[in-house]
Image (cartoon, grey):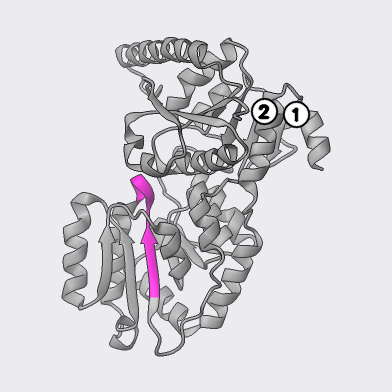
Amino acid sequence: MEKGLIVLAAGGTGGHLFPAEALGHELKARGYAVHLVTDSRAERFAGKFPADEIHVIPSATIGSKNPIALAKSLLTLWRGMRMARKLFSRLKPKAVIGFGGYPTVPPLLAATGMKIPSLIHEQNAVMGRANKLMASRVQAIAGGFLPEGSGTHSGKTVVTGNPVRPDVVAAAEKSYTASGENDPFNLVVFGGSQGAQFFSSAIPSAICLLEDQYRKRLRVTQQARTEDQDAVNASYDKLGLAADVSPFFGDMPRRIADANLVISRSGASTVSELAVIGRPSILVPYPYALDHDQAANAAALQAEGGAKVIAQSHLSPEKLANILRHSMDEPAKLADTARAAKATGKPDAARRLADLVEAIAAGKPVSEFKEVAA
């Protein structure tokens, strides 16, 4: 027998949808119906999302200083809120949970206006703009890397960690295997929806500088934008390198588990998955992130010895080549980094967040939940 319906609202990128997906699996296991409210970008991720129904609600970014563009955005948000109110009047959800991104603004405005219990989950160490807009209206704020006990809304902030998908938890069961002197060395490179372009030129350029003894060991998995894919493949073909290049990998957790080293951006979901699986990484924060949230996420893992952080502006092909040489020459050091990363992981974050969702849905104050959790 179903316990009721929970609505999850998330922007249509992996960074927002992956933790929502993980919570969805946990809530379904507990007997809840789950619906997802998102935007059209979510279609490529929808196959694995455990939603009984997916609803696309109009939304818009509030970023332009142009008064006409701003007016259009506000009108779209208002339309989205009206649609969400009508949807919630029909569905009667027990709670609405937002995971950031502007597509969460209309449903959360509707939910808070209708007195439906609601909370937001912030994946990053710095709160995003959409979540900032909603923070004062919701009953609770769950954090992945947010500092607990400080900030304007510290009284209702609970650090749950970032929920990771079941295939990430499964991948974490595989122990890290160091690559010996003559063994293949699995390098996994990815950059998310915005950050992959830099790696498409930097990684092949760095590998080109390696001596044959290093290059022949490399097995590369690399995410590249569709428009860069052919050029990246051509670079690796010219080098005679075994490489798997694609805009999207549906089995990325398994590939991370197989990696000897990961080079990636440092979005919150990425950092959380690297920690849970326990793999050594070179993190290159996306330099154009508005709130520099990626730098803060990366710093949290580096502080525990679980990663090395390098600014993109400091990462020349020569420096990257040196990093690869040292990594292949020092397998014990990579193994130590892998252990340190895994020690920071929170594989039970989905359970902890689901506990908070149930408490909020039942009308319990955050302070009472914190006491029980402690």
The residue drawn where x is 61% and y is 44% is 350
The mark found on residue 366 in the picture is 1
Q: Is residue 343 visible?
A: yes
- Residue 370 spot, x, y in % from top left: 78, 36
Task: Name the amino acid, label 1.
Answer: Val
Q: Residue at x 38, y 82 (%)?
A: 184
Which quadrant holds residue 86?
top left
Measured as percent of width and height from the top left, residue 178 is found at 50, 80
Q: Which mark is residue 249?
A: none
- 269 is higher (above) or lower (below) than 12: below
- Say which residue appears at 53% left-offset and 69% top-offset: 174
Q: Nearer the viewer, residue 129 or 77?
A: 77
Q: Is residue 90 left or right of residue 243?
A: right
Specify few, some or many for label 2: CA neighbours under 10 Å numbering under 14, 14-19, or 20 or more: many
Q: Which mark is drawn over residue 140?
A: 2
Q: Specify the segment rendered in magenta.
A: 186-195
Residue 7 in picture, x, y percent from top left = 52, 26
Q: Secondary structure at mark 2?
A: strand
Q: Residue furthest front?
A: 1
Vertical order, 288 against 275 (above or below) = above
